[in-house]
Image (tube, coloured by chain):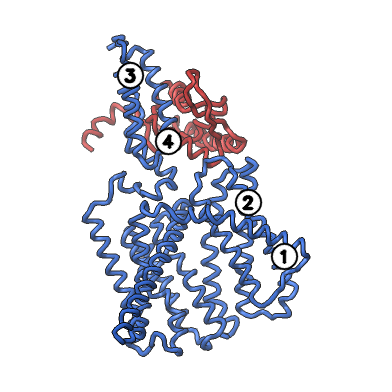
Amino acid sequence: MAEPAREVGSSDSLEGQIEQWRSYLRRRPAIRPMDVEELEDHLRGEVAALRDAGLSENEAFLVAVKRMGALDAISHEFAREHSERLWKQLVIASNGTAQPVDEARTEAIVVFVLALVAALAVKVPELFGREWGAAADQTFYARNFSLFVLPLLAGYFVWKRRLSVRTWRWLALAFAAGVVLSNVYPFETGSDTEVLTALHLPIALWLPVGVAYAGGRWGRSAGRMDFVRFSGELFIYYALIALGGGVLIAFTLGMFKAIGIDAEPVVENWVPCGIVGAVIVGSWLVEAKQSVIENMAPVLTRLFTPMFALALVVFLGTMAWTGRGIDIERNALIAFDLVLVLVLGLLLYSISARDPQAPPGAFDLLLVLLLVSALLANAFALAAIGARISEFGFTPNRVAALGENVILLGNLAWSTVLYIRFLRGRGAFASLERWQTAYLPVYSVWAAIVVVGFPLVFGFE
Amino acid sequence: MDINKDLVAATATPLVLAILAEGDSYGYAILKRVSELSRGELQWTDGMLYPVLHRLERQGHIKGKWGASETGRKRKYYHLTARGQAQLADQRQQWQMVNTALRNIWPAISLPTRLALSPLRSHG
């Protein structure tokens, strides 16, 4: 076997073989070009050692490749470690092969049926005399709207991820609690607590949807991060579908108007079906066509982070320059909550798209600038509000807004600390990611507190 | 001897960290050191080392840096961080505890040798 086969041109063939091996590696979505370089260095080390032991170039290459392990297994391990790279392909389960055609068709049918069920479910209350568009029933639909679609969406993921009965029983329980709470409480019509319930119930119920989406990976940071990505992409798809729906409605109305028929009452009646159906169809699109839209949320984040940072810095600068305090009127707190939500969104989607191993860069500095200026602006606002909150009184709206502010502030303040540590090389980026994913349930739990507790505490006013 | 997969996975972290505590190193050299330390008994699938290294890097236990090999090719070297040292100290304690427990029980029991087991295996 120890045949010193070192004829001229053999190094070409070795290079050729290595090149071919590299191209196989590169096709794996979980293995990045940098990893290929690292693995290649390893392969070359092994080949050199084997050749020193007397093997021919060909033999050395074959043995080295064999020792490297099966590409499928390696790429699977890389995929487990770097799940963020797979967001577009999600090959962990299917080992790199695309979804079989009949499976995809089954899924399309399931989605179509679920969307149809959601669309019909919205119509069911009409059988009991609840009329969409009637002023008296507006608050009924506002309170319950998320309940027509979110359980079905969770059901889609329960089916797709093959969740165990034990898990989905808990999810069903959560949705059932939502149905009971939003309908049993004797709200005064149009009261603050009723509006708060309508706003917070979807946020509270987004948690069970997340648990279903993660399909057993909810306990892991990567699973939750995937859900964050999913939520962002769904939002974008949904906005696009809504835009298309709007155009469709405008054209329909216009055409019927041309023949002298007012189609508005009919169309208006069917709009809610579209609104709920689109959530399920949008989710399916996000699942199925991840690579088509190429992660829009991070792209938008890149685009808008500098602009928001600039706007906030200019705002703070103007405040300092002119010496103007924040003019506290009734809705100032909500406005600042929204600023914090926005900043949190920018932070989350920057984190979700970032390679955790990349060294700190200019964009990280920009994000820290954004965080610090948002925290400063919010601190001024809180100080001003705190001074006058007793004067305004503790209405349910204000307590809810204040609670949200505290929750967001807590998250962003600690994120800033972690981010600065990372920039100074004292911490890993992963700790920031873990902090964000660990925090996710807090939003839903707070929303649940608002839904469950506030009506009782404030007497359904 | 074939070592159980779970055991290989469990020992990977302390071994890699300890090898890097000896000095900065790179993938191929780390594997060679593993083989040396176990007198060739512990054989990892080469490619599996890298996801482990990347995980340790993500957790902040080690830090990778691209440099050049003797021949001038790109090579990624890993360095043990302060956090990794703390983790290694922690792991060492845990493994010593496990080791002590096992050491204490081995002399107290008698086991059939591997040879005696093999007919049983062929039935199963």
| Front tag of 3 and 4 | 3
Estimate the x, y position of residue A296 in percent, counting from the top left: 44, 55
Judging by colour alone, the chain drawn in blue in this rendered image is A
Q: Nearer the viewer, residue A211 or B114?
A: A211
Element under disc 1: helix
Q: Which residue is mark 3?
A: A12
Q: CA distance from mark 4 to mark 1?
A: 47 Å
Q: Are marks 3 and 4 on the same chain?
A: yes
Residue B40 or A446: which is nearer the viewer? A446
Q: Earlier in the sequence, mark 1 or mark 2?
A: 2
Answer whether residue A346 is visible to the viewer in this image.
yes
Q: Are marks 1 and 2 in contact (CB under 8 Å)?
A: no
Amino acid carrying mark 2 in the image: Val
Chain at numbered mark 3: A
Which residue is labeled 2 in the image? A368
Mark 4 = which residue?
A: A33
